[in-house]
Amino acid sequence: MPTAIHRRVRALRAGQDPTFVARLASGWAVMGDPQVMPGYCLLLPDPVVAHLNDFDGAARARFLADVATLGDAIRAATGALRINYAMFGNAEPALHAHLIPRYAQEAAEQRGLHPWALDWQAAPPFDPVVHAPLRQRIHAELGRAGVIGAPGRIHHLDLTVADLATSTAFYEGVMPLMGFRRMPDCPEGPIWRGDAVEIGLQAARRLRPHDRYVPGLHHLAFEAPSRPDVDRVYQQLLALRVQVLDAPAGYPAYGPGYYAVFFADPDGIKLEYAYTPG
């Protein structure tokens, strides 16, 4: 009989679980609901198995290594004193690991309690807006650990633009919406830095209309941490009167759960803000 773990993994594959943190080698890292402790997460194996013992040696080692790495990321992101780890499977008979951070500032009468003796009823429910910064910090720590996003990383990308002042003003409004921050300008033009890539602008020496169907740049896609973030940026683009090419929509041909908005810069360069679950 399918369990809640099966249903949740199906939702994660479809990009429909807002608690998503990252797709690891052995499964899905997600935020716990409720957040009985700030940063409480779970690791759900994909494919789902009933027991840790159902894995062969390599798969078992991979899952346990991912549990420990996720624990490292939670500690780094939260400043937790330690992580409580638990794998039960009694109420939901499918393998899943709980990772519950514990804090030095907990009340004295609570510090020695088993996690299941905490007041789960009073814990705040997971909120995709309220808990987005914490989720993003855990995601970033997993990236720094090299378990997601590290291989093949691009350092920077420069775009050639017709009018440097006009394009600088455009990107100054748009880039912070997607998590980029302005850096000191280089001699060629401005730079914005994200977690894993820098985007710069340079003035064109010869002018011609941009055509993404000739050799060169077709479009530039930025990574969104969630579907709601795509919708948020879309509304902000409208407020900035940016030319939206395609409103937020799903693109299953590009992958399960793919969700994106497309827009254009002053030169007609196509830009995308895309969410994919993993």
Image (cartoon, grey):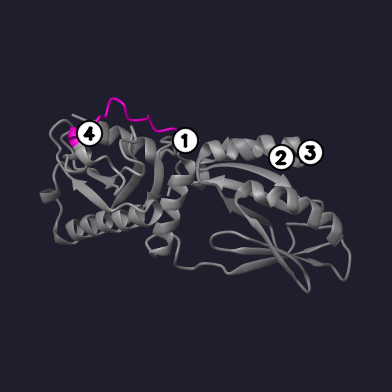
**Element at badge 4?**
loop
Look at the image and say whether residue 119 sits in the magenta stretch.
yes
Residue that mark 3 sits on: 241
Judged by depth in the image, the label closer to the viewer, 4 or 1, is 4
Q: Looking at the image, tell me whether mark 3 or mark 1 is earlier in sequence order.
A: 1
Nearer-the-camera pick, 269 or 181: 181
Q: Quadrant of residue 245?
A: top right
Mark 4–mark 2 Cα distance, whole angstroms, equals 43 Å
Please state the horizontal and vertical placement of residue 43, each as a whole percent of the image: 28, 46
Residue that mark 4 sits on: 118
Give neighbour class at mark 2: few <14, some 14-19, many 20+ (Cα, 10 Å): some
The answer to whether any part of residue 186 appears in the image is yes
Q: Looking at the image, tell me whether mark 4 or mark 1 is earlier in sequence order.
A: 4
Q: Who's the residue at 47% across and 49% down the image?
A: 136
**Element at badge 3?**
loop
Mark 3–mark 1 Cα distance, whole angstroms, equals 27 Å
Give neighbour class at mark 3: few <14, some 14-19, many 20+ (Cα, 10 Å): few
**Quick check: 206 above or below 133?**
below
For residue 10, side relative to residue 234 (left or right): left
Q: Looking at the image, tell me whether mark 3 or mark 4 is earlier in sequence order.
A: 4
**Element at badge 2?**
helix
